[in-house]
Image: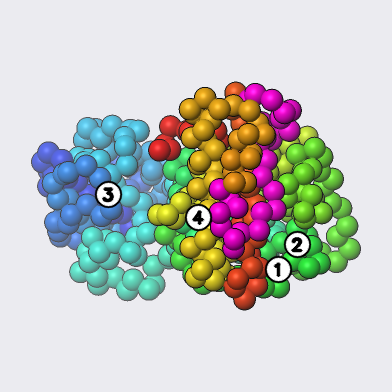
Amino acid sequence: MVAVQVWLGLGSNLGDRRGHLTGALTALAAVPGVQVLRVSSFHESELLGEGPPQGPFLNGVAELRTTLGPQALLGVLQALEAQAGRVRPAPRNHPRPLDLDLLTYGDLRCDTRELVLPHPRWHERPFVTGPLRELGVALEALPQRPGVAVVGDPQAFAAQCTEWLAGGCVVGLVPTMGALHDGHRSLMEIAARECDRVAATIFVNPLQFGPNEDFAAYPRTLERDLEVCRAAGVHAVFTPTPEQMYEPGFCSQVQVGAEAQGMEGALRPDHFRGVATVVARLFALARPQRAYFGEKDAQQVAVVRRMTRDLGFPVQIVPCPIVREADGLARSSRNVYLSAEDRAAATVLVRALRSARQQFLRGACDRDALLQRVRAVVATEPRAQLDYVELRREGDLAELPPGPVDGGRLLIAAKFAGGLRPVRLLDNLSLRPGPDEA
Ligand code: PAF
């Protein structure tokens, strides 16, 4: 086999740091098929990122030449780490006696659960770039990976997800329409904690807007959105145009049922058909194991869950808690269009929901009395035009009959028309507070 040039990152911050690094290099040089060509001097650096209190690292780099394949070499490196006392799996950023990171392996690019080549962040790490420069390496000549891949072509997006799946990764999908705020960011961060790879999608989906709705005016802030994705740990962002998403002749849509009736479904005919269609298309392209949706759009979550079950997509739908402003207003991409007065008035939605919940927790359990309580609070705010308030069963949001309830979810929508254009806001609240709620 042809020998391949490899750059290795070395680190240790536990025990005899220098001894661990030199011991590993000596052992590596004795492995058949591995030559250690050059080693930088070792430098001290503090932990990058968050972790428990710990001492500084001793870091360096080494140039190898090897006839071992990347997986075989990785196996050797992990065995040396284990010999030095490193325990796997271990919590992220815990102190460790030995870190042997494959930075590059020739020009090879691979992205599996075990191994990403070139190392995704080597060029951002001073404890790697410093020693490389010291050895006279031209950094721009070494292969790098973009921090986050931005893909418009559906086939390229599908190919990226297929590569991850084939490499044993758990893939999480976060579908969005962009104009990302902290609510979206929290979906991405949850996905990044739970999955090996996260794909976010940014696509203002024309199918889910009615003829008189705000499709053209929907905020589009791609550059800022990509920053949010990067910071939240997303690996790839799918940003198709409508023509890429729906090729000429595209005419199949997902018919939705009971979950789409009433509330948003009544006010926005065809909205959920458009949502279900685009989400099904995204599931078919990405084939994620998990998909993340915000609970602010609770009816959307119920529709997507039903569609997923009915069509048999093997994906777990993960609803994520509503993210609120300090004054309680639910985060929404449309909040930016509220006039200052409407913005102040909009907190009436969450105040009304919380007030009804408080009554419920004090023993009031009549469905209509609770709904009346919400209406009464909203009526104190003349800027709010109530579209609906309903109390539905948790989960599938089925209608609850009049009379006593033992729980459920209050859902509300209202219009605020004091700005440049009318803004519709949604919110919802479970009658029973979750573990993280006040
Ligand atoms: O919630 C949204 O932003 C959209 O409805 C979704 C799920 C991305 C589909 O276009």
Give amino acid for label 2: Phe
- Tell me the tag on residue 76: none
Judging from the image, what secondary structure is the residue with disc 4 in?
loop
Residue at the location (64% across, 39% down)? 371
In the image, what residue type sits under mark 1? Asp
Pinpoint residue 254: horizontal percent, then vertical percent. 82, 47
Asked whether, in this view, residue 422 is left or right of residue 118, the answer is right
- Judged from this view, the residue extending furthest toward the bottom is 420
Whether residue 399 appears in magenta in the rendering, the answer is yes
The quadrant where ligand 1 appears is: bottom right
Q: Are marks 3 and 2 in contact (CB under 8 Å)?
A: no
* Disc nearer the start of the sequence (2/4): 2
Q: Is residue 60 visible?
A: yes
The residue depicted at 38 percent of the width and 43 percent of the height is: 74
Residue at x 21% of width, y 57% of height: 60
C-alpha separation, residue under disc 1 versus residue under disc 4: 23 Å
Q: Secondary structure at mark 2?
A: loop
* Residue kind at label 4, given as amino acid type: Thr
Spatial CA distance of label 2 from label 4 is 26 Å
Q: Which mark is residue 214?
A: 1
Query: Residue tagged by mark 2?
Result: 209
Q: Which residue is mark 3?
A: 50
- For residue 347, the mark is 4
Span colored in magenta = 377-405
